[in-house]
Amino acid sequence: MASALENYISMSIVTADGRIIVGTLKGFDQTINLILDESHERVFSSTSGVEQVVLGLYIIRGDNVAVIGEIDDDADSYLDLNSIRAEPLNPVVH
């Protein structure tokens, strides 16, 4: 696992309850439990910009992960989160 994580990458995780958590992947295991550092939750609203709630070092259980994606740090830095309007995601229904 250590060799796979030599270059830590920025990740965006959508959880089963509809939360979007962004952070630097520091570790994972065979059940997709994730360890994120410098993480924050992006809370979307249809009336105001995206709020970023600082979480710091954060662990997400694998059974709560719905979608994982890598973030392009250059493209992400150009986003104006204050001008983005969107409805929050609904929880995943099995």
Image (cartoon, helix red, strand yellow):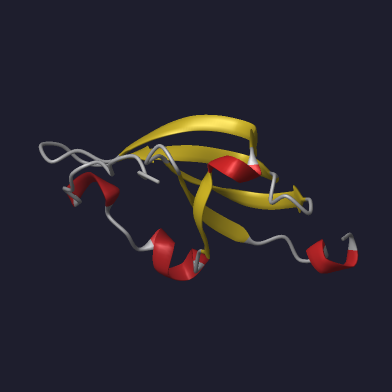
Residue 90 is situated, as x and y percent measured from the top left of the image, at: 28, 41
Which sits in the foreground, 32 or 71? Answer: 32
Which sits in the foreground, 93 or 53? Answer: 93
Tell me: 31 left or right of 1: left
Which residue lies most toward the front here? 94
Residue 26 is situated, as x and y percent measured from the top left of the image, at: 74, 50
Image quarter of residue 93: top left
Image quarter of residue 5: bottom right
Residue 31 is situated, as x and y percent measured from the top left of the image, at: 73, 50
> Looking at the figure, which quarter contains the N terminus?
bottom right
- At a point 18% along the width and 48% down the height, the residue shown is 86
Which residue lies most toward the left here? 47
Picture mark count: 0
- The answer to whether residue 70 is above or below residue 88 is below
Tell me: 8 left or right of 43: right
- At a point 64% along the width and 38% down the height, the residue shown is 61
- At a point 54% along the width and 41% down the height, the residue shown is 64
Residue 59 is situated, as x and y percent measured from the top left of the image, at: 66, 36
Tell me: 43 left or right of 30: left
Tell me: 79 left or right of 48: right
